[in-house]
């Protein structure tokens, strides 16, 4: 029953694509990175692996955004906060794992030694256990989203209002985390990590593992979201997106539906953040800046809202372009990026996916 | 310092006696070539010699207009020309080897004290006031001087200041009666420094003796301190209110344009901050044009900049509306993305045109400095001007929305776009003009911000979150709500800041907004109506 | 509802192609990275050209390109021309790490000149250590760090902050008794103030005569704080020690002058305000406020004249924004010195290989625009630098009112921070 339901999530071509993607991410790229010698033209550098790993984390973030924006009609301008919380949760573990190798040679993280703190604050308790931090990764953003969402949805805060208060939320959190006294390293955040679960982060094998984990997490999240949106729950969500009042008149209470999608989305963000941090090697409060959260919405829009796959492509495209532009045209890349956003919203309201669909339907009409 | 003051008196007596003679050559030599100690001695000698001829030299030294050649010849070099400081002969040009005499704060302080003595009898009451205030902590030896000035002073403000200075000196008198009188007069002061001076009287030394031996004087001092503290408290709260309103008026200027565009038209304009920035850069350009073409009227540049800032921002706004935003009506969330793109482009455009660094926009001279009220509270002119300006802009916007045809159209379109269309209102034109108005008001805001902060490509980014908060808190579609929200947030912030620090105050305000919206999802002033879906 | 459902089905079919596209793009990036010509030596320039830090860092990129042009005009290094690879990390700290990896691994640069903020340096540090790269960091900073892979050409706290405070306490500096430490809330001001607090205490300043206040990044409303400063200053001779970060300085100084605080009453000494920052402020009301640096544009010596002329010419030639109003400042000088020292070390080592250059860097000297012969310390990767204190002039330049007799050795591990006595130089 379950397996049947799962197999129906995508058609044969879709599953094939997922298989190819997994093969690329889990086998081909790691092999090219680890096994092929560096002077070979087929060698994949650590830079590319971490770049692609980072992009897959962003893609997961965009996917989470699509679940709430594309399917429940909730535009969050604060998803960066959940992402950062996940990152900080794992970051705490990574900081503890540095141990006495830090500059200060103390058991405490360097920034606490600097603040003259003699022991860990209470909210750092247990962070030397991986399982606890792994729980925190989903629970911290999840709980915050649950509480925030419960009150906001109960008060029927919608549309632009909701977007703006999520922005206020992430802005307030950013200011809070910037404070040195908050106990999360202030502006410098966490950096200079050494190892995870005993494996050195500088080790190529660890890098490849994190890369594979990001890819697998992305596909699992995609399947989960697809499962949700094709279920009855997903239909109700879509209905809420289209006209919430009618759904209410039909006897549904939108609150639990919205709350579920919202909280799940925040948890996915947390996972994305946790995968992101060991790969880029730093987490700091600027991840919570309102601008970063707006960018997440932009990736989603560029790829195409309400398509799940679209946002993944959008995130890859925008970030890939950014990576390339910042080297190729360091002084002009913002023009390209700005123009891209304007053109996409003006001419491709359904994003890249909409464009592809339009092209295909045109071809179909020609053929018939 | 003590010596200097003694010399000051000597100077003034000397001046009154009309006992002028040639300037001391060694002193001038030291002024030109000596180190700081030698220079200060030189200043003292010059003042002591009591020749008014020293005044222009000292003034030039303070203004950085005094130059010296390696041989020790002193020259006053100003825009008006070059003169020999000693002979007062005009020269065609300064010798090549002349270089400016650089002084540091210590020399500058000595100069100020020297010049203050001269200024006490100046014909300009502002200068006399400044001098009197400078003497507030003066040495008792200056007492006869202050008494003399007190006798001839007619201006009540200066008189008060002199009286305080006078009492401050009498504090060290040997006569307990005089000390008592002095303490009582000082009780009229509203200065923190005076309070501290009185507190010293109540301190005990190592042997358990009070600094002030007379118990009566001590009791009077305690009373005086209480009175000063009372006044300081009032001034402090008044200060919070003023700074709060000032911050609020900045927020209002930043948010008003957004309130029109976003509130009335339902458009989320992320490029709003960049319209502020354009207004500020327009001000900068106007300032530079004045510098180049009308340097004699430089102080008026700001007045000319106001319409220019409005016009440029309005034009940019209208171009954006026609080019991009009008295609996105009814899709508010997507306007957000497109306008974000616009904002990126505008920021980078300014970087390419004016450079990534901030540019200099100076306050016109009538906006520098401030007025002192309640004894210790300084209200800077630029803040006052901005508050007044914000109120003016507010009135104009209100008039435009309620008493013009455009305003009528805007309100009609806001309430019901399709119905307004049916009634023959040109909705497209209305949109464009309303957007232009909103953008223009943002330009005005930028013009005002150039007077208190940075003018750089990132100017707008700093205000965008704040302005959204103000609009949302005030209630969409309500100008009045925006006003209350802006002023309320400003004053709240300023009352929280002294106790919680700038960072926590800001966080608390944001949390407050989040909680407030839970209670009143439509903001302070909800648009009345029976629409089901907003 | 209906349309979105249809879209959902369409997506399933369309999914395949999208995945392929992604894969092809990825492969494209991989192969583009291959094969490099070897007749030039690549050097990386890692300064933010967009985002919040562009305001400070853009000039460093320009001055780096100018220096490279100068070196190339004289025949380059080891007979090869230098080729600058400029990237924009966009004031985004993870992007700094990614870009440095890209410079080292993909572009295979011999050395990187870059970073401004401490957090950006901390972000790239693990990358440079992992790949054994070489970074020249040109900005004054808080110390508390010493990496094999970094050469620090800016000042450590003992080369800037401490002499400045000593000056304020001296007769010439006004014999300040009370100190208002004002900064932006991040690591550089925090560390500097911690060191200064310990230093002041060692000089007998009482706890009650020191006040420490922090503001958030981008803070623009200093009304309350200036009122606070005035209140504090009523208690005795006060100096403000400002570690306010770049952009917030303008509103701070404007508020200060409009509230009538003069340098002769309460001098403000700043560690992050130089010629470049003053370009954005009307300096007339600020006359007499101080800054401590290791270089000022107003210095008169042949090296500086040459440096300024070269910069002015470069600005004109490249038509850089700002034109003849462009100035030089301390981090620009540090960039200039860093690049030249690296070139000298490469010539000495006869190689641009990191380990050899690092060895050759020890004891390297350079006659700098500051007028002094600067030396790279043999052990601690920091420059010996002179310290100068300048008072702001009405034209936005500085009058030098005090300077050290000779260059000072850097102390990256400040003796005023407990626990540092155990730490050693390399």
Image: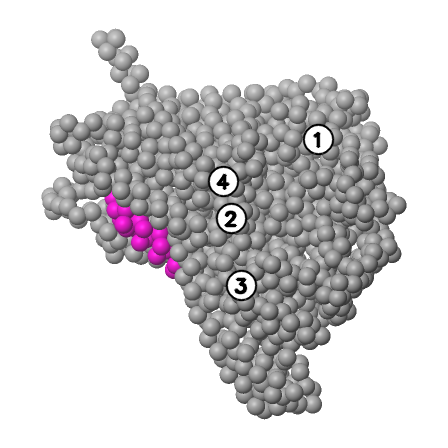
Q: Which residue is mark 2?
A: B366
Q: Would you say B11 lies left or right of C30 here? A: right
On whether disc 2 and disc 1 are found on a single subunit, the reply is no
Say which quadrant the N terminus of chain A sits in.
top left
Where residue C167 sits in the image (x, y, percent)? Answer: 74, 58
Residue position marked by numbered label 3 in the rendering: C228
Could you tell which of marks 2 and 4 lies nearer the N-terminus? 4
The verdict on residue B487 being magenta is yes
Check residue B482 for magenta coloring.
yes
Q: Secondary structure at mark 4?
A: helix
Residues at marks 4 and 3 on the same chain: no
Query: Is residue C356 rendered to the left or right of residue A179?
Result: right
User: Do marks 4 and 1 share a chain?
Assistant: no
Q: Are marks 1 and 3 on the same chain?
A: yes
CA separation in Å, label 4 and label 1:
35 Å
- Mark 2 to mark 4: distance in Å? 9 Å
Q: Note whether residue A361 is visible.
A: yes
Q: Residue furthest front?
A: B18
Q: State how far apart marks 2 and 1 are (Cα).
A: 37 Å
Q: Who comes first in sequence, dot 1 or dot 3?
A: 3
Q: Which residue is mark 4?
A: B300
- Cα distance, mark 1 to mark 3? 41 Å
Q: Which residue is mark 1?
A: C311
**Disc 4 from disc 3: Cα separation:** 33 Å
Secondary structure state at the residue bearing disc 2: helix
| Chain letter of the residue carrying label 4 | B
* Residue at figure coordinates x 62%, y 29% from the top left: C323
Residue at 58% in and 85% down: B180
């Amino acid at each position: 029953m379950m397996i049947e339901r799962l197999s129906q999530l995508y058609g044969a071509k879709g599953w094939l694509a997922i298989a190819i993607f997994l093969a690329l991410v889990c086998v081909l790229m790691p092999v090219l990175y680890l096994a092929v010698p560096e002077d070979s033209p087929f060698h994949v550098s650590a830079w590319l692996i971490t770049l692609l790993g980072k992009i897959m984390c962003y893609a997961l973030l965009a996917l989470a955004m699509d679940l709430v924006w594309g399917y429940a009609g909730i535009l969050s301008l604060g998803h960066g906060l959940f992402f950062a919380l996940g990152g900080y949760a794992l970051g705490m573990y990574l900081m503890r794992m540095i141990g006495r190798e830090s500059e200060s040679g103390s058991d405490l993280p360097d920034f606490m030694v600097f603040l003259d703190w003699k022991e860990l604050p209470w909210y750092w308790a247990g962070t030397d256990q991986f399982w606890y931090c792994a729980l925190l990764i989903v629970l911290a953003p999840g709980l915050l989203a649950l509480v925030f969402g419960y009150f906001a949805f109960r008060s029927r805060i919608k549309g632009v209002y909701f977007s703006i208060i999520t922005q206020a939320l992430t802005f307030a959190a950013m200011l809070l985390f910037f404070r040195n006294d908050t106990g999360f390293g202030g502006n410098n955040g966490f950096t200079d990590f050494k190892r995870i679960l005993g494996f050195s982060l500088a080790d190529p094998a660890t890098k490849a593992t994190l890369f594979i984990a990001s890819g697998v997490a992305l596909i699992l999240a995609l399947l989960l979201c697809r499962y949700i949106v094709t279920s009855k729950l997903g239909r109700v969500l879509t209905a809420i997106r289209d006209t919430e009042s009618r759904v209410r008149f039909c006897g549904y209470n939108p609150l639990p539906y919205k709350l579920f999608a919202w909280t799940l989305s925040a948890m996915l963000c947390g996972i994305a953040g946790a995968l992101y941090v060991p790969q880029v090697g730093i987490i700091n409060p600027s991840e919570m800046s309102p601008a970063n959260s707006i960018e997440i919405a932009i990736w989603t829009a560029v790829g195409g809202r309400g398509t799940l796959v679209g946002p993944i492509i959008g995130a890859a495209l925008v970030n890939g372009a950014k990576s390339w532009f910042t080297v190729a045209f360091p002084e002009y890349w913002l023009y390209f990026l700005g123009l891209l956003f304007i053109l996409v919203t003006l001419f491709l309201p359904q994003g890249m996916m909409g464009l592809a669909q339009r092209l295909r339907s045109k071809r179909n009409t020609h053929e018939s | 310092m003590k010596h200097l003051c003694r010399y000051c008196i000597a100077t003034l007596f000397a001046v009154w006696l009309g006992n002028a003679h040639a300037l001391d050559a060694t002193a001038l030599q030291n002024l030109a070539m000596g180190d700081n100690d030698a220079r200060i001695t030189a200043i003292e000698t010059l003042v002591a010699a009591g020749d008014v001829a020293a005044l222009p030299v000292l003034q030039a030294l303070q203004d950085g207009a005094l130059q010296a050649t390696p041989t020790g010849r002193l020259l006053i070099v100003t825009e008006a020309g070059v003169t020999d400081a000693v002979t007062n002969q005009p020269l065609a040009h300064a010798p090549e080897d002349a270089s400016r005499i650089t002084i540091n704060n210590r020399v500058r302080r000595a100069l100020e004290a020297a010049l203050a003595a001269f200024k006490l009898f100046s014909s300009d009451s502002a200068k006399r006031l400044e001098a009197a205030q400078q003497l507030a902590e003066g040495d008792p030896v200056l007492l006869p001087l202050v008494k003399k000035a007190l006798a001839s002073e007619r201006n009540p403000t200066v008189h008060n200041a002199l009286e305080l200075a006078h009492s401050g000196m009498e504090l060290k008198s040997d006569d307990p009666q005089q000390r008592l009188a002095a303490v009582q007069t000082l009780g009229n002061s509203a200065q923190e420094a005076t309070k501290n001076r009185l507190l010293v009287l109540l301190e005990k030394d190592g042997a358990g003796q009070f600094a002030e031996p007379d118990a009566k004087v001590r009791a009077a001092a305690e009373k005086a301190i209480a009175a000063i503290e009372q006044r300081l408290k009032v001034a402090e709260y008044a200060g919070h209110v003023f700074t709060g309103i000032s911050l609020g008026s900045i927020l209002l200027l930043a948010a008003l344009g957004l309130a029109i565009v976003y509130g009335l038209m339902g458009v989320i304009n992320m490029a709003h901050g960049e319209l502020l920035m354009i207004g500020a850069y327009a001000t900068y350009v106007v300032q530079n044009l004045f510098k180049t073409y009308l340097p004699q009227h430089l102080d008026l540049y700001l007045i000319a900049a106001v319409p220019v800032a409005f016009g440029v921002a309005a034009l940019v706004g209208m171009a954006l509306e026609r080019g991009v935003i009008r295609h996105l009506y009814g899709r508010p969330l997507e306007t957000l993305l497109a306008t974000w793109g616009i904002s990126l482009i505008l920021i980078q455009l300014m970087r390419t045109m004016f450079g990534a660094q901030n540019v200099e926009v100076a306050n016109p001279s009538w906006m520098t400095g401030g007025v002192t009220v309640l004894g210790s509270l300084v209200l800077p002119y630029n803040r006052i001007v901005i508050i007044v300006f914000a109120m003016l802009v507010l009135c104009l916007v209100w008039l435009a929305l309620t008493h013009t045809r455009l305003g009528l159209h805007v309100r009609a379109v806001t309430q019901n776009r399709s119905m307004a269309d049916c009634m023959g209102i040109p909705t497209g034109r209305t949109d464009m003009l309303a957007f232009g108005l909103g953008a223009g008001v943002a330009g005005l805001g930028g013009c005002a911000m150039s007077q208190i902060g940075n003018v750089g490509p990132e100017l707008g980014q700093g205000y965008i979150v704040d302005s959204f908060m103000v609009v949302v808190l005030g209630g969409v579609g309500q100008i009045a709500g925006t006003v209350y929200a802006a002023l309320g947030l400003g004053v709240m912030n300023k009352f929280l800041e002294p106790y919680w620090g700038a960072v926590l105050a800001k966080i608390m305000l944001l949390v407050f907004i989040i909680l407030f919206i839970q209670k009143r999802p439509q903001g302070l002033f909800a648009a009345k109506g029976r629409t089901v879906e907003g | 509802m209906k349309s979105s459902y249809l879209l959902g089905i369409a997506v399933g079919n369309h999914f395949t192609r999208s995945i392929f596209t992604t894969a092809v793009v990825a492969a494209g990036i991989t192969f583009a990275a291959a094969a490099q010509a070897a007749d030039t030596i690549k050097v990386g320039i890692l300064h933010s050209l967009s985002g919040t830090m562009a305001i400070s860092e853009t000039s460093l990129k320009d001055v780096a390109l100018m220096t490279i042009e100068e070196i190339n005009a004289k025949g380059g290094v080891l007979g090869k021309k230098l080729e600058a690879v400029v990237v924009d990390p966009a004031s985004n700290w993870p992007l700094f790490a990614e870009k440095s990896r890209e410079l080292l691994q993909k572009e295979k640069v011999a050395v990187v000149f870059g970073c401004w903020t401490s957090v950006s340096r901390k972000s790239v540090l693990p990358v440079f250590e992992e790949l054994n790269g070489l970074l020249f960091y040109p900005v004054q900073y808080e110390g508390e760090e010493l990496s094999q892979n970094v050469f620090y050409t800016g000042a450590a706290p003992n080369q800037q902050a401490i002499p400045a405070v000593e000056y304020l306490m001296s007769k010439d500096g006004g014999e300040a008794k009370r100190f208002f430490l004002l900064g932006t809330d991040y690591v550089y001001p925090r560390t500097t103030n911690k060191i200064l607090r310990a230093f002041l205490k060692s000089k007998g300043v009482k706890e009650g005569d020191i006040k420490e206040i922090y503001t958030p990044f981008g803070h623009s409303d200093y009304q309350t704080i200036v009122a606070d400063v005035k209140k504090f200053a009523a208690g005795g001779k006060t100096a403000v020690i400002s570690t306010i970060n770049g952009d917030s300085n303008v509103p701070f100084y404007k508020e200060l002058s409009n509230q009538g605080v003069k340098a002769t009453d309460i001098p403000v000494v700043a560690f992050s305000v130089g010629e470049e920052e003053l370009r954005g402020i009307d300096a007339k009301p600020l006359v007499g406020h101080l800054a401590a640096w290791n270089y000022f544009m107003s210095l008169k010596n042949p090296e500086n004249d040459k440096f300024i002329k070269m910069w002015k010419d470069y600005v004109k030639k490249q038509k850089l924004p700002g034109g003849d109003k462009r100035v030089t400042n301390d981090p620009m000088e540090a960039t200039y010195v860093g690049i030249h020292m690296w070139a000298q070390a490469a010539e000495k080592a006869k190689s641009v290989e990191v380990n050899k250059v690092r060895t050759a860097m020890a004891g390297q000297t350079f006659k700098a625009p500051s007028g002094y012969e600067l030396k790279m310390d043999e052990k601690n990767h920091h420059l010996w630098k002179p310290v100068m204190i300048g008072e702001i002039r009405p034209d936005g330049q500085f009058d030098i009112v005090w300077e050290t007799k000779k260059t000072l050795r850097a102390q990256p591990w400040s003796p005023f921070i407990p626990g540092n006595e155990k730490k050693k130089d390399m």
